[in-house]
Image: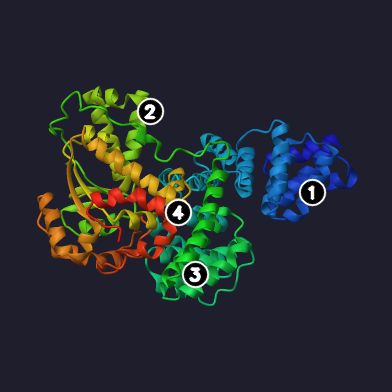
Amino acid sequence: MRDLYEQALALWHDGQCAQSEALARRLVQVAPAFAPGLALLATFHLQHGQVGHARPLLEHALRLQPDLVEAWINLGNACLELDDIDAAVQAFENARRQGAEGVAYLLGHGLACLGKGGFAPARQLLVRAYALEPEAADVRLAYARCLVEFERFDDAAQVLAGLEAGHLGGQQRKALAWLQMQCGQDEVALALYTGLIGQMPEDAEPRIQLALLLERLNRVDEAAQVLAGLPPPASDDGRAMLALASARIARRSGQPRTAAALAQAALPFGADPAMRAQLWFEVAKDHDQEGDAAATIHALEHAHAQARLAFQSRWPETALPAVLGWLDQRRRHAPAVAVDAGTRQGPPDPVFLVGFPRSGTTLLERMLDAHSALDVLDERPALEVMIENLRRRDGWRDAALDASLDGLPGAAVDQARADYWQQVHRHLVPQGRLVDKYPLTMTRLPYVARLFPQADWLLLLRHPCDCVLSCHMQAFGLNGGALAFESLASTAQTYVRVMEWWHAQREWVPARVHVLRYEDLVQAPAQRLEALMGFLSLPMQAAQLQSHHAAAQRSRRINTPSYSQVIEPVNANAVGRWKRYRAFFGDAVLAELEPWARRFGYTME
């Protein structure tokens, strides 16, 4: 019996699979209680795609001999194929207890944890698998999927870089298309989906995902055509995703009531809190479009509750982070040394377009990007990555910000600037002066002043109540900062804290700032834009006042929740929207925001 098993293994290792399988079948016939033989025959079933035959053989083998590590791994993979995630997790846990290691175990266990919603253990397993086999396609896809769950999109894009779709199987190409879409690689994703739909016409999933991407690119009519006549998917996840895509298309086609009904009907199918949050945010947008303030606020309560659950599922052992905790880093006195005189070689220092989120920075970004002498970096964390690298190298503590920045040697400044431009060039190579649009860069004023002393700042203001309402109504993603916006009260507190920080730091940190109010820009766009361009020492160009045409024809997505609004002509429709929701702010919140409204020239009427 043992000799027959060894012969079968030797044939398998020599590549004589047919002969090996024949011996394995003979072995199971003559020794049906010999666990290694059962496990070996199950392996051949798996190779032939006969997962339903392999699973019971593996389960029987492991009841007979529970220390078969490879059998546990194979059982886990079989359960994954059969979409029995609980059984897969249990199988891989048993493999771990038996001392399993290596890429096959790490990859399978990581995928099982992802399927179960165990994002933190999945990340630990998959980062180890990727370290062992960084070129393996299945490992790269799984690790990138995990990174996307943690919204590390740039890192995921790097993991996927160079992965050839032509060398992948159909399911792998589906995974790659979805991941490229999440990473903002829209042209790549569009090409992949087009191919998948032609190759897998019976599979609804690629069509649904393509429709989501087309809507995100403001190609709403095309998205509707893609979904036309599509039957409901069999899986609950597919049905929820189809409902989300259909609801977004209906809302943007002027049918908010239909959109709300579609999204709400799908809520029972959304198992992941992240999907349920997206559906509730859609319902809120629909009710807001209909003018039903009470229903909008009710939907937002559900949306933010689900978003919090989704965050906690990704960071289960982490205390919810303090809102913008780095605001404790601040200068307490003027710089001890003069900032650099700006004689360094290289691109000119950027223009930083900032403001509290939802203050109109996207509208101004489109106007600036339409100028031939400017190039806009659209909400990419280039500066944040630079700061992270700088702090990691020098081991700073938050309280030491003054001394750390003042004491930075020239070589460290040069390296930090190089890090920044390297991040920028991952997304675009500016032909003109760079405009870095990342609203909360306003909370990084000391870093910019030290490292980019010739930078210009464009600060956009908007009525504090409109800012707060709009932030509360948006799905900003599954990050700790977004939790700041889960209620009108918490959003108002965040607004006050950011503005207090900015004005306090302006007393200590030199900066050249042009301040513009959103309401003034939409009321008199030519006049306000001309003044702003004068600040930048550039002439205004006619195309800037027609930037919505360029936005509508743009092939890359606009990285902001207001992507659907910037393809419309400049208008004042959003001015004063908060007044419809005044009753939901409450007296305490309004009292907290009133001093800032007065300071910026607004009234609370």
State the image coordinates of residue 10 (x, y, percent, origin top left): 73, 37
- Residue type at the position of mark 4: Gln
State the image coordinates of residue 540 (x, y, percent, origin top left): 12, 59
Give the mark nearer the N terminus: 2 vs 4. Answer: 4
Task: Give the foreground label among 1 and 3.
Answer: 3
Q: Which residue is mark 1?
A: 22
Task: Give the foreground label among 1 and 4.
Answer: 4
Which element carries disc 2, helix, strand or loop?
A: helix
Q: Give me the disc on residue 182.
A: 4
Task: Give the foreground label among 2 and 3.
Answer: 3
Q: Left or right: 302 with respect to 393?
A: right
Q: Which residue is rendered at x = 55% and y = 74% of the image?
A: 230
Q: Quadrant of residue 129?
A: top right
Q: Which residue is rendered at x = 64% and y = 48% of the image?
A: 116
- Residue type at the position of mark 1: Ala
The reply to whether the C-beta atoms of the residues labelled 2 and 4 are less than 8 Å apart is no
Task: Give the foreground label among 2 and 4.
Answer: 2
The one of 183 and 319 positioned closer to us in this rendering: 319
Q: Which residue is mark 3?
A: 247
Q: Is residue 143 above or below residue 451?
A: below
Cα distance, mark 2 to mark 3? 44 Å
Q: Left or right: 600 with respect to 53?
A: left
State the image coordinates of residue 191 (x, y, percent, origin top left): 42, 62
Which element carries disc 1, helix, strand or loop?
A: helix
Cα distance, mark 3 to mark 4? 20 Å
The one of 202 and 355 positioned closer to us in this rendering: 355
